[in-house]
Amino acid sequence: MIQDSERWHDAIVKIAEIASMAANGGEDPDSGPYEGEASEEAPQKGGIVCTPKQLPARLLILAAETAMKINPVNAPVLGPFAAMADGFQVSEPMRIAVLTSKYWGPAPRKLTVSFMESTPTDLKNRILSHMNAWNKTACISFVLTNGTGDVRISRRSGGYYSYLGTDILHIPKNRQTMNLQGFTMSTPESEYKRVVRHETGHTLGMPHEHMRKALVNRIDPAKAYKWFLQTYGWDKATVDAQVLASLDEASLMSTPPDQTSIMCYQLPGVITKDGKPITGGTDINATDSAFAGKIYPKGPVKSQPAAADAYEEDWPESDDVDVSV
Amino acid sequence: MGRLIEVDDPLKCPSRLAVHAGDMLLFRAAGGRVRSGQGVVEMLGPFLQAILVEGGEVLTPQGPPNTVLFRACRPGHAVVDVITGDPFYQPHTTSCELTVES
């Protein structure tokens, strides 16, 4: 429980940082709501040094909830990570802790990329160029390294997959974080767009779009169970996990579910209620791009001081203010 | 003693394979079926490979299942299908005729 509490505390601090930057629109945080008194303990060399104050721990959850109610911009930050804690409720602290732990943060970042197997340079560069298709709007870019990358790609069997967001940092260095089975220079360009860009979306922390409630609602569960069992031998639990589990809309960005998103699988009409297929995405579309740019904004976003540098200012609990938004 | 027989690339699996009762076949695949010979062979899964990391957390990648197991239960013949590639987009099916020996 103590560990849970600490994780929740850390998560809230992170949300507060992100919310602050979003609210500032990428402006210098020194001119925003964090402006305040300098800490007496802070160094004073060369001028004013501002150290953010931190709410007492008992108010952090309430503050985060209030921040999200006041400024809808705060909500999308959580959106793409909602799927990662499927089955949890928004109000459960652990959920948000898990969700925020996948997020790379809004500051520009370069993730290094390496390959598990010997890979020709032209193939490396081709894969990398498709990964960086997200970088047109997002502030995260991918760069090759001769060492061991943050992102480690294998082209061996195992299909296509990627670990989510910052989870990749926890994967043992001798294991791939992304699998692109069988990709070669002969693989069609359309597959690079459809698969590499999709898996890179996961690396950025994005879940599957076809798990949006409106799209899941189009699927007839009985048809889906039957079809996936007959076609792939999938049991109900697998179908539930892959196709029928829907994301919690309350914590998602308020864009309409988009069956052409690159993060949406193609699903056949034989499993839908209306007989029409869910078309699935074949490339990053305009909504994907805009969304990536929102959660990973390009521009002069400055890092907030580390949470550890903030100090907590406490007062008697009886002085707490009830804020109803 | 039963053996765990890993078939890393199902596309390269021979069309006929002899195994022993008690053996387990592991395919890197998104799905599978026992087309004939139910009882001779049973399918377990599919599974999505996950990884245990420091702290005891199990991390699961985003993606379809990628592992299928077949257990050779008793002597006889069976045909299994193994589905590889992207199950949501033009998957590939490979068949293998299994002879299960005692």
Image: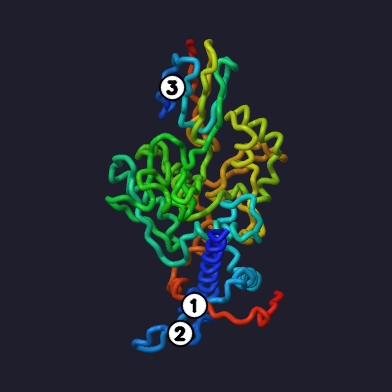
| Residue kind at label 1, given as amino acid type | Tyr
In front of the other: A23 or A136: A23
| Residue kind at label 3, given as amino acid type | Arg
In front of the other: A65 or A76: A65
Which residue lies at the image location 64% right of the left edge and 72% below the top edge? A66
A181 relative to A86, above or below: above
Color style of the picture: rainbow
Q: Are marks 1 and 2 in contact (CB under 8 Å)?
A: yes
Which residue has dot 2 on it? A39
Which residue has dot 3 on it? B3
3D distance between C-alphas at marks 3 and 1 = 59 Å
Which residue lies at the image location 54% right of the left edge and 47% below the top edge? A281
Instruction: Name the element at disc 1.
Output: strand
Residue A291 seen in the figure: no
| Residue kind at label 2, given as amino acid type | Ser
Checking the image for residue A311, the label placed there is 1
3D distance between C-alphas at marks 2 and 3 = 66 Å
Instruction: Name the element at disc 2.
Output: loop
* Residue A290 coordinates in the image, percent (x, y): 53, 61
* Residue A26 coordinates in the image, percent (x, y): 48, 74
Quarter of the C terminus of chain A within the rendering: bottom right
Which residue lies at the image location 54% right of the left edge and 13% below the top edge? B74
Name the subunit of mark 3: B
Name the subunit of mark 2: A
* Residue B38 coordinates in the image, percent (x, y): 60, 17
Q: Are marks 2 and 3 in contact (CB under 8 Å)?
A: no
Residue B1 seen in the figure: yes
Which residue lies at the image location 32% right of the left edge and 53% below the top edge? A144
